[in-house]
Amino acid sequence: MIKEIELKLLPVEANNMELIRSKAAHKLKIKKEQIEHLQLLRRSVDARGYQAFFRLRLAIYINEKFQPEQAILKSYRSVSNADSAIIIGAGPAGYFAALELIERGIKPVVFERGKDVRSRRRDLRAIQQFGVVNPHSNYCFGEGGAGTYSDGKLYTRSHKRGDIYKVLRLLVEHGAEEDILIDAHPHIGSNKLPKIVAAIRESILQLGGEIHFDSHVTDLIIEDFVVKGVIINDSQEYYGDAIILATGHSARDIYQMLWRKSITIEPKSFALGVRIEHSQMLIDKIQYNQESRENALPAASYRLSTQVDGRGVFSFCMCPGGLVVPAATSPGEIVVNGMSLSRRDSAYANSGTVVAVELEDLQDYEQYGVFAGLTLQKEIEQRMFEYGDGSQKAPAQRLMDFVEGKLSKDIPPTSYIPGHISAPLHELLPGFIYQRLRQGILNFGKKMKGYYTNEAVVIGTESRTSSPIRIPRIRENYQHPDIQGLFPCGEGAGYAGGIISAAMDGQNVALALSKFYKEKS
């Protein structure tokens, strides 16, 4: 017999399995010896009251043996001699699409403009320490995509879009801790993700797939509105009957290429703002009602949202115990993002704090048509860079000074390695963005006592939360409405927002592609 129960435990009790077994037996009114196995299904922190607790949901095996699940990868067979499909991009959408194609008996051929995950580190060091931006290898481009070196949070609200558990299981089979299967807000960490990404690559290669790095797709080969292949680095042709376009939200050249070829792309709403950094100790104190956080508790996080003038203002990609990092993809721009290592033990907590930008907000950019939002993004990123000294030092302002519209005399220490420059972010941001951010922050201060402090730092700019352009696709078959065999996918196409949703979209698109191949044969 298997019974599911929920237990509420103090932080110091949450890892004591013998105590948990005793409490489970007491709740079920059985003897401890009758419990053959405890399966932890869900773990979350409940900090709504004065005392923080862990809530555990468990499956209790009473006089019944536990049968572990078989590894997903064990069912995969080599596709080295199978029909192939092209995947553009080796981020979570591209790699999970590749794994799904292999499961369906199709050989994935992946082209990635950036470098493999290990080689990519040198370019990240260059942007951090010397302000040198490699436009093909940075925090957004390269093996694993933006998620590899920007925290590795695995949270998504899009449970109806695909099989979240399958994505998490595959991550575990490639080296992630099993905790991600049970935590309410699972997280891997940017120190562990590179090895996991490399392990996924090895699985794809060992099972007969191909992966090509430093392979920038510069054009598509299309005849009579049917995909025929791609052109790599302006010279090399590679042919295939289908293409999964999984290039990420910052591959602006792909949008330009599609536009030049008269392939439909559409403007869409997006979000833009700043990254705000507090002391992690302060966030812990606010969220846990404790002067100092108990060792058993994780670094506290928050999620905030409000409405200002009909637009959402919200926290995004909150990184407890994390770092702010430079995420520019071209020279001459300042873009920031957040990341944290697996232990989340930095002294700082940061979060993107952004405003929803709707199409009607872009009236001053109407002459740019479908590229209006992208043009706004670029102008702000370049304005932030031009205010500085030609490096990746980011414009920054104390939080209360930002709200009050005055230049900060000095900036407290932050986690942002390239450094910062005291700047009037209230002037560098467009008025409609700043005014909504300003009121949103005041609202957040009322919701979270202690959040609104001049010891917090505002860093500009958080501009790559999502793409301002969508590559349309037909709902029924995931193909572009103009081009047969072209499958837009992931964040860059406008259908995902994070590692898990991008991975699930990759799986869904790969499944649609396999059906497309069956119908052709």
Image (cartoon, rainbow, N blue to C red):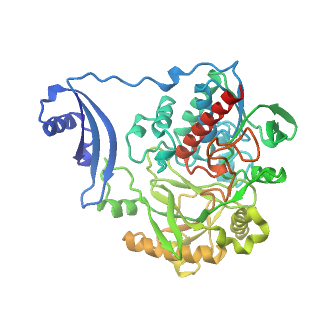
| Quadrant in the picture for the C terminus | top right
Q: Which sits in the foreground, 380 or 248?
A: 248
Q: Is residue 52 above or below residue 145?
A: below
Q: Position of residue 315 (x, y in %)?
A: 49, 62
Locate residue 19 relative to residue 69 in the image: left or right: left
Q: Quadrant of residue 131?
A: bottom right
Pick out the residue farthest to the right.
235
Q: Position of residue 30 (x, y in %)?
A: 12, 32
Q: Quadrant of residue 108?
A: top right
Identify the residue shown where x is 53% and y is 58%. 415
Identify the residue shown where x is 47% and y is 48%. 155
Can residue 141 be spotted in the picture?
A: yes
Identify the residue shown where x is 49% and y is 26%. 72
Q: Is residue 347 above or below residue 458?
A: above
| Quadrant in the picture for the N terminus | top left
Locate residue 148 relative to residue 322 in the image: left or right: right
Q: Which sits in the foreground, 135 or 413?
A: 135
Q: Position of residue 352 (x, y in %)?
A: 54, 61
Identify the residue shown where x is 75% and y is 57%. 331
Q: Is residue 362 above or below residue 174?
A: below
